[in-house]
Amino acid sequence: GAGVSQSPRYKVTKRGQDVALRCDPISGHVSLYWYRQALGQGPEFLTYFNYEAQQDKSGLPNDRFSAERPEGSISTLTIQRTEQRDSAMYRCASSLVLGGPSNQPQHFGDGTRLSIL
Amino acid sequence: AQTVTQSQPEMSVQEAETVTLSCTYDTSESNYYLFWYKQPPSRQMILVIRQEAYKQQNATENRFSVNFQKAAKSFSLKISDSQLGDTAMYFCASFNAGGTSYGKLTFGQGTILTVHP
């Protein structure tokens, strides 16, 4: 597609439920990133993939959070047993290549706003 | 570890005037990139401008330019001829092209810019 697509745009769920957030990167983009953004703050890195390989998951807050990108395209961020503190905007970004002499910037999706009741 | 600091929580400017947003960063890497992203009320995340650390020339994109002071680790954004549509939150971000932070953007806290008619 023309841009990074995330779904759903909004998700409201009760505490304790599992949620799955989807990201469809720009076609052909190798790298895919997940960030979490609290209201009024900058995004914080969660994890990223090159193709289907998860390269760094150091930003995932705890083991309730996981991500996958099984075919090197669409990615899913899953939060199990959600808690109110998980409420935030979750953003996905993609880039054509990682690193290199003409570093490609990360292009962001519009995010999924997650609210845990 | 990387850090990015934006010391101006809010700024305002009159339409058609010039405004400068400040950003300082800290990194131990020699190869890195710097970005300014714009987040309007619609909550999109839009790339405004980027700078490669190895380039001495300041980047320019139409009305947007940067003042990159590598020794001082400063990366300010100048917006000329401000327009109402420039009203947004602006985030400064750094990206290390090597080291343990490779692959992730680190964002500052953001500066809310309001352009008044």
Image (cartoon, rainbow, N blue to C red):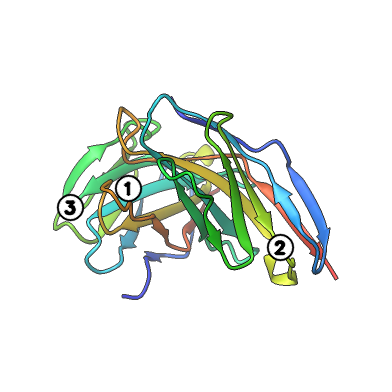
**Mark 1 element type:** strand
**What type is the residue that disc 2 sits on?**
Ser
Which chain does the numbered disc 3 sit on?
Answer: A
**What type is the residue that disc 3 sits on?**
Tyr
Q: Nearer the viewer, mark 1 or mark 2?
A: 2
Give the residue at mark 3.
Answer: A51
Which chain does the numbered disc 2 sit on?
Answer: B
Give the residue at mark 2.
Answer: B80
Mark sitting on residue A78? 1
Estimate how packed mark 2 is, as few (under 14), some (14 to 19) or many (20 or more) residues with alpha carbons within 10 Å: some
Instruction: State the CA–CA distance, disc 3 to disc 1.
Output: 18 Å
Task: Compare residues B77 and B95 and report the one nearer the observer.
Answer: B77
**What type is the residue that disc 1 sits on?**
Thr
Circle count: 3
Residue A57: percent from left, percent from top: 29, 35
Estimate how packed mark 3 is, as few (under 14), some (14 to 19) or many (20 or more) residues with alpha carbons within 10 Å: some
Q: Is residue A66 above or below residue A24?
A: above
| Disc with the residue nearer the chain's start (3 vs 1) | 3
Q: Quadrant of residue A38?
A: top right
On the rendered structure, is A64 left or right of B24? left
Residue A48: percent from left, percent from top: 29, 44
Task: Compare residues A33 and A7 and report the one nearer the observer.
Answer: A33
